[in-house]
Image (spheres, helix red, strand yellow):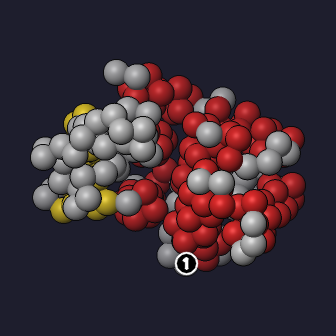
Amino acid sequence: MLTLFHAPKSRSTRMIWLLEELGAPYEVKVVDIARRDGVGAKDPANPHPHKQVPALLDDGVLISESVAIALYLTDKFPAAGIGPVVGDPLRGSYLTWLAYYAGVLEPVISAHFEGRTATDPMKAQYEALDARLKSALEATPYLLGEAFSAADIVFASLLQFAREMLPAHAVYDEWLGRLNARPALARAMAKDAG
């Protein structure tokens, strides 16, 4: 049994969505986390090394961080078809988008949230991120082309909670519309709410 350590309305909500898309058997353990607004606290019941979420236990093996969990789960449940397997021509693009999320999007969006993207060099990085994502979604309906993947979940989950973090391009809203219509997301949001 997979156990997801989850705090409502946090980055771990995307992992509930992913688990629902995969049709994987799992349980959710709600934990408290320290949030940016000062609410909450580090929960000793949370196995994440920094007491953050998401954290996933699989038969005693701990996986933490969204990208690692997404890759782990899509590799564990390949039949769901939302994570290209080794040998699939889309695997390289999939890995690239997951790494881009962790290595580029998260730091740049954090800088934007803190108001640091109004000046260089962060302004240039923010504009490059926007241009790359916008260009990809203008060309195809999903990050991997015609195929929905866990990369879409990881990227879109940011915009579902904080749409204002990226410019108001119609292509982003259309992408979110496609993703927001997925039945697995509706199930995940119901579970996130308790």
Q: Is residue 8 above or below residue 110?
A: above
Quadrant of the image occupied by residue 94: bottom right
Q: Residue at x 13, y 58 (%)?
A: 60
Q: Residue at x 73, y 49 (%)?
A: 166
Q: Residue at x 53, y 26 (%)?
A: 186
Question: How many residues crowd around disc 1 within 10 Å: few (fewer than 14), some, or many (20 or more)?
Answer: few
Q: Residue at x 22, y 46 (%)?
A: 42
Q: Is residue 13 above or below residue 87?
A: above
Element assignment for label 1: loop
Left or right of 160 on screen, residue 174: right
Most foreground residue, 121 or 14: 121
Note whether residue 19 is visible: no
Left or right of 119 on screen, residue 76: left
Which residue type carries mark 1?
Gly
Quadrant of the image occupied by residue 163: top right
Residue 134 in the image, given as x and y percentages of width and height: 81, 57
Most foreground residue, 160 or 27: 160
Residue 50 in the image, given as x and y percentages of width and height: 26, 59
Residue 20 in the image, given as x and y percentages of width and height: 43, 38
Left or right of 190 on screen, residue 29: left
Label 1, on which residue?
A: 87
Q: Which image quadrant: the C terminus?
A: top left
Note whether residue 66 is visible: yes
Left or right of 17 on screen, residue 170: right
Residue 80 in the image, given as x and y percentages of width and height: 49, 50
Most foreground residue, 10 or 116: 116
Q: Is residue 163 above or below residue 97?
A: above
Quadrant of the image occupied by residue 132: bottom right
